[in-house]
Image (cartoon, rainbow, N blue to C red):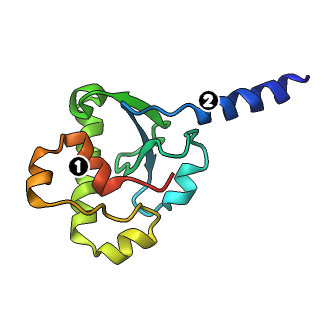
Amino acid sequence: MTVLHLETRLIKLEARTARPDEMLVVWRRPSGEVAEALKGATFAKGDKVICAEWFEEGPVPEPRWYRGRLRSAMGPAKYAQVERTIERVAEGSAASRNKAGFAPYPNFTEDRAKEMTDAELIYAILGVRT
């Protein structure tokens, strides 16, 4: 087997490994497409993946898996970008959000929303189809 073939197989095996306690954060520019941002990311069907906008100058951060509380795991600068993305999504319509490539909003009650963790709420708003 060639090295390239082995690398390809490893990537596919890693993509099949579900990560139930982790969330993949993929970044894109505010004018960028969700589908385009996801092209470089490796994840399995059913993984929790969000696509947030990167408003800062310079290169967009690479996709990265986070475990636990996003606010403390990713640091204040990156978490501020996630919050800003949520605000922009909240200002738009659900139809435009779904057309952008995000997963449909899940159905849950107000009481359930109060019980959800920050990560669960972020995923409900910025989660993408996997």
Which residue ends up furthest to the right in the rendered image?
1
- Which badge, 1 or 2, is on the more N-terminal residue? 2
- Image quarter of residue 111: bottom left
Coordinates of residue 12 in the picture (x, y in percent): 69, 35
Cα gap from disc 1 to disc 2, whole angstroms? 26 Å
> Mark 1 falls on what kind of element?
helix
The residue closer to the viewer here, 111 or 61, is: 111
Residue at position x 25%, y 56% in the image: 86
* Residue 7, numbered circle: none
Coordinates of residue 105 in the picture (x, y in percent): 31, 63
> Mark 2 falls on what kind of element?
helix
Q: Amino acid at mark 2?
A: Glu
Q: Which residue is mark 2?
A: 14
Label 2 crowd (10 A; few <14 / some 14-19 / many >=20)? few
The residue closer to the viewer here, 117 or 88, is: 117
The residue closer to the viewer here, 112 or 80, is: 112
Residue at position x 54%, y 46% in the image: 45
Left or right of 121 on screen, residue 2: right
Q: Amino acid at mark 1?
A: Leu
Mark 1 and mark 2 residues within 8 Å of each other at the beta carbon: no
- Above or below residue 103? Residue 15 is above
Quadrant of the rendering where the N terminus is positioned: top right
Coordinates of residue 67 in the picture (x, y in percent): 34, 27
Residue at position x 37%, y 65% in the image: 104
Q: Which residue is mark 1?
A: 121
How many numbered marks appear? 2
- Image quarter of residue 70: top left
Left or right of 18 on screen, residue 82: left
